[in-house]
Image: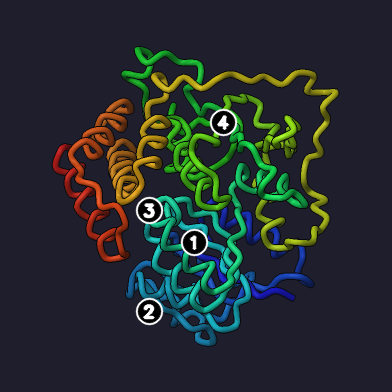
Amino acid sequence: MKNISLMGATGSIGTQTLDIIKEHPEEFRLVAMATGKNIDLTRKIIHDFQPELVSVSDRSSAKVLEAEFPNISFTYGNDGLTEVAVYHKADILVNAVIGSIGLTPTLQAIKEKKTIAIANKETLVTAGHLVMAEAKKNQVALLPVDSEHSAIFQALQGEKEKNIEKLILTASGGSFRDCSRQELENVTVNEALNHPNWSMGAKITIDSATMMNKGLEVIEAHWLFSMEYDNIEVLLHKESIIHSMIELHDSSIIAQLGTPDMRVPIQYALTYPDRLPLPTANRLNLAEIGKLHFQKMDMDRFRCLRYAFEAGKSGGTMPTVLNAANEAAVAAFLEGKASFLQIEELIESALSIHKNISNPNLLEIQEVDMETRKYVNSLI
């Protein structure tokens, strides 16, 4: 039995993690969870899973739930996130929150030697050097949950690091993959949220449309797999059947394939190094699919991907700026305060004015994150 702490329980990854726990009650138990403002869903999850500790966004929500569930401990806010992350009975922390808010709890969980199943890109993008150093120091495993990183992780099993030539991340292209830049000038939020392959949260779906999601994954792959940026490639693959690949020195390429179903990488992170059946998953039938398509990425068409490679290669606080500016810009777009193409413009502006700090500590990262958000919001 593995005891699970889950941050972001009401989100897309969180609810699918709960599906897996429910599917295998003899293998997993939810002991602690953190949610946001969706109190109705939080209430249902508490009823179904009976966790011992629950963190919500604010004190008033915690008080309401405390009255309804007197046998469960409640907390709230950023401190509550950390309490869930380090909960003493948990074996694995699933970090499924959106944004850099997941960084501090993850660092604390690593110090407590929790295994980390990480779906929160921003933790590694914002402070990859700190996270990986802490993980190495405490001999903690970081198990990827993103389908692309899980695919690479699976393809790497049994391979020697010295034989790895290149990582190849595949990208669906998002909601507007067939649109020209001119056609993007007046796209709506609803159009941007209509992803052709995956069912994800709003922020990640917009990031997929701008290709920032893939850019963040490139930086994440750099840290997770100790790979230089010149040896990471992104390939447009509209079907999302090949989730990612590795290329070896002898020219062999190993790919991980499957239908688009996030429960597969989530479950693998929870069961690693073993596997469990997933009877509700759709099986891949290549004969029915017939053809798979691939295309080179256009860095002028998908400028956010270019910004990510540039920020990653610069290192220091540049990825922090990239991430913070993107979060602020996407929030503005979702609220109708900025156009779709303005997301790129706001990010580029924030990157262009920033004076890079080459080896930032946690406080400097947090300060740069806050200053970047203020700057982007001032432009909006």
User: How many residues crowd mark 1 within 10 Å: few (<14), some (14–19), many (20+)?
Assistant: many
Which residue matches tag 1?
A: 132
User: How many residues crowd mark 3 within 10 Å: few (<14), some (14–19), many (20+)?
Assistant: many
Helix, strand or loop at disc 1?
helix
Single out the mark in the foreground, 3 or 2.
3
Which residue matches tag 4?
A: 171
> How far across and how far down the image is residue 275, in percent?
80, 58
Q: How many marks?
A: 4
> How far across and how far down the image is residue 242, in percent?
69, 33
The colour style of the image is rainbow
Single out the mark in the foreground, 4 or 2.
4
> How far across and how far down the image is residue 191, in percent?
44, 26
Helix, strand or loop at disc 3?
helix
Residue 76, relative to residue 188: is it above or below?
A: below
Which residue matches tag 3?
A: 126
Q: Marks 3/2: CA distance?
A: 33 Å
Q: Who comes first in sequence, dot 3 or dot 2?
A: 2
Which residue matches tag 2?
A: 63
Side (left or right) of 308 relative to 350: right
Give the residue type at disc 4.
Ala
Q: Nearer the viewer, residue 42 or 305?
A: 305
Q: Marks 1/3: CA distance?
A: 12 Å
Q: Who comes first in sequence, dot 2 or dot 1?
A: 2
Q: Marks 4/1: CA distance?
A: 25 Å
Residue 28 in which image quadrant: bottom right
Q: Marks 2/1: CA distance?
A: 37 Å
Q: Marks 4/3: CA distance?
A: 22 Å
Residue shown at 44%/56% (left/top)?
128
Q: Who comes first in sequence, dot 4 or dot 1?
A: 1
Residue 268, relative to residue 256: is it above or below?
A: below
Side (left or right) of 223 relative to 141: left
